[in-house]
Amino acid sequence: MAASTVQGAGASSAGFDVPGQGRGLLEVFRWRYLLRLLVRKETSTRYRNSVLGWVWSYVRPAAQFLIFYLVLGVFLNMNRGVENFALYLFSGIIVVNFFSEGFGNATRSLVDNAHLVRKIYMPRELFPVAAVFVSFIHFLPQAGILVVVAVLTGWLPMPLYLGAALLAMLIIALASTGLGLFFGSLNVAFRDAQNFVDLILLVATWASPVLYSWEMVAVHVPSWVMWIYQVNPLTAAVELFHLAFWSPVTSGGMICLRISGLPWDLCGDHPRHAAHRSVGVPQDRATICAGSLMERQGHTNMGTHEPAIVAEHITKHFSLKHTHSLKETFIAWTKRKQLRTEFTALNDLSFEVMEGESIALLGYNGSGKSTMLKIMSGVMPPDEGVVRMRGRVAGLIEVGAGFHPELTGRENVYLNAAILGMKEHEIDAIFEKIVDFAEIREFLDQEVKYYSSGMFMRLAFSVAIHVELDILLVDEILSVGDAPFREKCRLKFQEMIRENKTMVVVSHDMELVRELCDRGVVIKRGRKRFDGPIEEAIAYLGSEDYQRDD
């Protein structure tokens, strides 16, 4: 579980982490194994059971190229005005496709993975970054075709050209990631963001020199419009690809873009060209160069006397939105209607859990138990107060939340364990234990969409229960499988208690709570009403005092 050590909280906070706090995009590097699995999941499932498979990566750009070439190149005679127009067109199309797929998928990634975001902590930045990586993988075959065609027309892999192509790919990757992070977070609140992105992508091809040359823009617009046009990262990337692959095989051999007022100039020339291409564009407008380069012990043993969990004055509010789009919000605002209703799920809740202690959070539905568990797991932050945890935390909040139906049982074991915070070598070490506990070895290499619900839950539970941890958070998931498997699960929990693992259990099964927990914290309407021995906590929950206590 990713967290950052609490700073400035006094000596008592030494060794504690605040769940859910990360370092933004830097967390992606720390979770790079999971990033690799997310990318592999997307690339392996996209065309699984498809007849053509990866051929679809070529179909779209090929269709675009043929349509644009026929309409613009042949019918409108642009192939006469732009030398090697086919190469010029294709080198621009694949750059725009890279940007469109990366930006579009990154924008949708958080909403598409909402089932994970709401149940399990992991850096949210992983999803947009993974989406851009996937788009880059789909871009590579297209780039390979471009290189082959360019070589056949006399292109040579000079350092300047290769550098320009790499710079163009870097610009697109950074732009797609940045815009995807921004619009992806906006898309969580308003689905209009996705439609707005679709509109951007619709005009992306026309807003960069893919179907036409930049000279056409420079001649017809004021210099300040041309400046904006050139600082567009998509324009810079397309022109860099033109520099890398198209310019060296044209008769002029030079593409040069210099933006008035900016201190850079990038030009390229092929060794076999003797003269630079002359462009008849006034200097006060623009002189063209490759692009504008912007850029976590037992029942009676309380273990040590050190706390493993400290929850201090936790308050959490939720808003019930009455509008779901920018249009509805604007209309409701103009009519002075209430846009949202706020309610308090947790209200100044405080408690501690000692290392090796097992406690139950008790209360009726809607009391705030699961919300508290999600805050402790890092899925959501508190609005007020702070939770501090000591050691690695694993949350059994929803078994199988990270499973993908198109992946095999084996692939899902590695993916889900990585989602729960484990590294590859750690998963390798416990893989056989997971499989033996789930009792589905003969079906391990079958897609889990063909599993029975019992098989699915057994494998998912087995993964979650074998994660290396110090603190285990459990929320109403102990009814998986048949009676023999549930008994196996109970024995596994007893083993964890003997190993001094700290446990926080949310359950309405009082027999299970008695068996696993030493202590109970009773919650009603987000406030703590009782904190003491488990039998007294259960008795208080069923008493008239709890019913009357407001």
Image (spheres, rainbow, N blue to C red):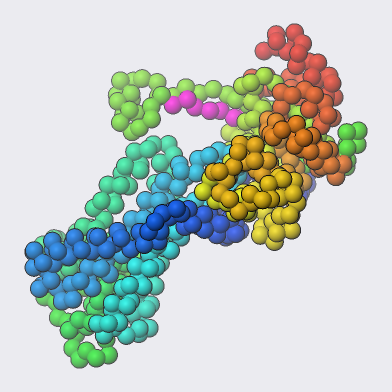
**Residue at the image point whose x is 30% and y is 31% from the top:** 327
Residue 361: x and y in percent read 73, 27
Q: Position of residue 394 (x, y in %)?
A: 69, 44
Task: Answer whether residue 333 is magenta in the image.
Answer: no
Q: Where residue 205 appears, x then y in whole percent?
A: 24, 58
Q: Image height check: is 70 above or below 349? A: below
- The residue lying toward the viewer, choosing from 121 and 493, is 493
Q: Which segment is the magenta one? A: 314-321
Q: Residue at x 52, y 58 (%)?
A: 40
Residue 151, placed above or below residue 372:
below
Observer-nearest of 226 and 154: 154
Q: Is residue 5 visible?
A: no
The reply to whether the magenta stretch includes residue 320 is yes
Residue at left 25%, top 60%? 63
Q: In the rendering, at what x and y percent does residue 240 appear?
A: 30, 72
Secondary structure character of the magenta stretch overall: strand
Judged left or right of residue 109, residue 222 is: left
Residue 489 figure quarter: top right
In this rendering, the answer to whether 13 lies above or below 361 is below
Which quarter of the figure has residue 172? bottom left
At x 69% / y 50%, what residue is drawn?
Answer: 441
Q: Can residue 454 be seen at all in this image of the molecule?
A: yes
Is residue 87 found left or right of 459 in the rendered image? left
**Of residues 118 and 182, the one drawn nearer to the viewer in this rendering:** 118
Q: Is residue 478 above or below residue 41?
A: above
